[in-house]
Image: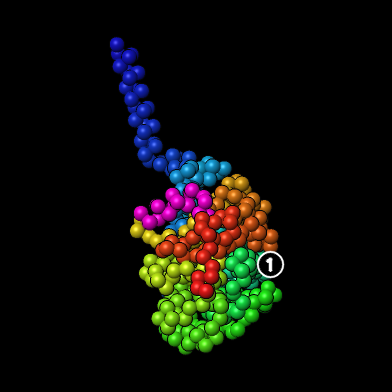
């Protein structure tokens, strides 16, 4: 009896000692959990570009949350992705400062940037550290023409968007009997608008269109009355604006007030024409405006689900959200295939990517000199208070109304 009692006491003491050792050294248990992988998310969430920055931020956050909920990076034992967020404050200098901070915090890669000047500066800063950078929007082709091995633009840039915009316009115009012959280009005077206007002015005449004038406007602009008066005197068949949100809204509302009514407004990479805020706040000014821009694939059911989640949280839906969701999914796929958070291995995985699990109207991913050749814009049109894809037909959910006015 005494022997049994002694054994029981020794068993209890051993169990107690083991438990105390575990409490005293919790790192032993934590070591079983893989180290999280830090991902830099760079967006301008203050300043003039804050609205677009918030759209992008929402997409990246939802994308990372879904990746983690699905088990994280399985090749690394289920390692979770951890966001290191940086506010680019709508200027390139702040973007560079945030890249430097992210470098100090040990991020494995960076996603985002939105505006071309921010993306140009931020990718250059990241290149000093061989830090992988996935550009979300930044359409200036200078971004991918500098030979930076760390830079990958997932969405289409100037050259791809301009070619698609012209091809889509030509086909839409031909299908309607070629009612549009003359065009006025209105563009913001920065890197984005000036570069795009130059390309359009060179290429459109090759397809039989006459450019009657190219008008540059500053960002921000407070009054476009003189611009609209000039449009009235020119009386072009088409007005093609390449401007940010505020200037597009101001231009459309001023045209509405002064009853300047071209046969169509066909925007290219426009800040408002593919933005639900514009459609909701100024429905009459927005109705029937067309745009060749980034947009989600309306035939992909995952977009409907994501949109419900975004709107249920009280936020608005815009293309930046599914685009950034797709960008972090692209990065997660690269890390998964690399089987490592090592920057060099991630760069190799991105360069050889064929990722197709995105939400955009693209084909499989294929990077050539940093540009995703599988990407392309679509032509959209505001119809009855909704933004519809009208071309190409493979992704469309509506037919184009063109010309809007005879």
Q: Choose between 400 and 206: the one closer to the eye.
A: 400
What residue does disc 1 label? 147
- Quarter of the view holding residue 375: bottom right
Q: Choose between 83 and 388: the one closer to the eye.
A: 388
Q: Is residue 68 above or below residue 176?
A: above
SS at circle 1: loop
**In the image, which residues are magenta?**
296-312
For residue 38, side relative to residue 206 (left or right)? left
Q: In which quadrant is the N terminus drawn?
A: top left
Q: In this view, does 281 lie above or below 255?
A: above
Where residue 151 sits: x, y (%)?
62, 63
Where residue 119 sits: x, y (%)?
56, 69
Q: Which residue corresponds to the image point at 53% horizontal and 70% vertical from the top-left?
A: 403
Q: Choose between 192 and 406: the one closer to the eye.
A: 406
Q: Which residue corresponds to the image point at 42% horizontal and 83% vertical from the top-left?
A: 258
- Quarter of the view holding residue 201: bottom right
Q: Is residue 304 magenta?
A: yes
Q: In this view, does 320 lie above or below 37?
A: below
Q: Which residue corresponds to the image point at 47% horizontal and 43% vertical from the top-left?
A: 70
């Amino acid at each position: 009896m005494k022997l049994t009692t002694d054994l029981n006491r020794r068993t209890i003491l051993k169990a107690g000692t083991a438990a105390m050792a575990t409490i005293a050294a919790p790192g032993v248990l934590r070591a079983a959990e893989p180290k999280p992988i830090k991902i830099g998310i760079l967006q301008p969430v203050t300043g003039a570009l804050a609205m677009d920055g918030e759209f992008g931020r929402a997409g990246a956050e939802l994308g990372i949350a879904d990746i983690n909920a699905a088990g994280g990076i399985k090749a690394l034992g289920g390692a979770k992705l951890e966001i290191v967020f940086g506010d680019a404050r709508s200027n390139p200098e702040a973007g560079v400062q945030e890249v430097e901070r992210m470098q100090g915090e040990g991020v494995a890669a960076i996603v985002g940037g939105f505006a071309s000047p921010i993306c140009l500066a931020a990718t250059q800063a990241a290149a000093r550290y061989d830090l992988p950078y996935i550009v979300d929007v930044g359409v200036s082709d200078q971004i991918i023409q500098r030979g930076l091995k760390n830079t990958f633009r997932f969405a289409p840039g100037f050259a791809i968007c301009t070619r698609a915009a012209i091809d889509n316009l030509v086909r839409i115009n031909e299908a309607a009997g070629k009612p549009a012959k003359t065009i006025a280009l209105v563009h913001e005077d920065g890197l984005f608008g000036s570069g795009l206007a130059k390309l359009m002015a060179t290429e459109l005449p090759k397809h039989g269109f006459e450019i009657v004038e190219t008008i540059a406007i500053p960002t921000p602009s407070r009054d476009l009355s003189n611009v609209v008066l000039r449009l009235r005197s020119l009386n072009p068949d088409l007005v093609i604006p390449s401007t940010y949100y505020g200037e597009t809204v101001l231009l459309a509302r001023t045209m509405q007030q002064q009853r300047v009514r071209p046969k169509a407004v066909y925007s290219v990479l426009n800040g408002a024409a593919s933005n639900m805020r514009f459609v909701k706040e100024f429905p009459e000014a927005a109705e029937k405006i067309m745009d060749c821009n980034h947009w989600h694939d309306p035939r992909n059911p995952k977009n409907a689900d994501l949109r419900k989640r975004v709107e249920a949280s009280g936020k608005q839906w815009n293309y930046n959200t599914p685009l950034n969701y797709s960008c972090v999914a692209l990065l997660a796929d690269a890390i998964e295939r690399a089987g490592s958070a090592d920057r060099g291995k991630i760069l190799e995985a991105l360069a050889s990517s064929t990722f197709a699990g995105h939400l955009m109207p693209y084909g499989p991913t294929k990077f050539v000199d940093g540009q995703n050749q599988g990407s392309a814009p679509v032509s959209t049109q505001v119809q009855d208070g909704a933004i519809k894809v009208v071309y190409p037909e493979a992704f469309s959910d509506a037919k184009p109304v063109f010309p809007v006015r005879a």
